[in-house]
Image: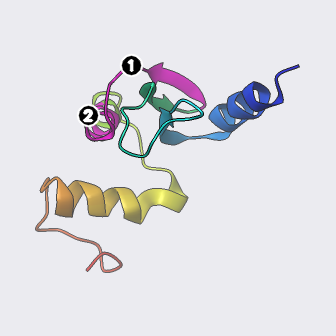
Amino acid sequence: MDTDGESSEAAVMETMFGIFVIRKEDAEPDDDPEDVGVILEGVKVLDELGNVPLAVVMLFALVYALNLSYPPQLRYTFEALQKIIMELDGKRLSKKNQ
């Protein structure tokens, strides 16, 4: 049995919103990843994106397209990314993010 594969699948199933990066075991930090993708509600919805910035943009696109709410424990993180980094509706920050 492949315990690493099983633990990876379990981690995916427990993830509400996420980006995954798969690297080869002997990869250097500056090597390109083997796979980059997006997880929504425990399902890999996109893969083979090539890099993390594209995966972040695709995650936000899916959230908007599917009209999803941010997970409560990550609400302020996603709000900061959306409003400060991506400059979407940045004039109305919550008090926590200000």
The residue stretch that appears in magenta: 42-61
Marks 1 and 2 close (CB-CB < 8 Å):
no
Residue 52 location in percent, x, y?
33, 39
Task: Residue at 35% x, 28% y: name it.
Answer: 66
Q: Residue 12 vs residue 97: left or right?
A: right
Q: Which mark is residue 91?
A: none
Q: Position of residue 22 (x, y in %)?
A: 51, 31
Based on the displayed image, in which of its 4 quarters is residue 61 positioned? top left
* Viewer-proximal residue among 29 and 3: 29
Residue appearing at x 50%, y 51% in the figure: 71
Task: Please identify the quarter of the rendering in which residue 9 is found.
Answer: top right
Q: Quadrant of residue 55?
A: top left
Find residue 90 and report its horizontal and vertical position in percent. 13, 63
For label 2, the residue is: 54
Task: Please name whichever residue, 3 or 89, is drawn nearer the observer in this view of the structure.
Answer: 3
Q: CA distance from mark 1 to mark 2?
A: 10 Å
Q: Quadrant of the N terminus?
A: top right
Residue of label 1: 48
The residue carrying pointer 1 sits among few (fewer than 14), some (14 to 19) or many (20 or more) residues within 10 Å by Cα, namely few
Q: Amino acid at mark 1?
A: Glu
Q: Residue at x 39, y 65 (%)?
A: 76
Q: Residue furthest right?
A: 1
Query: Label 1's element?
Result: loop
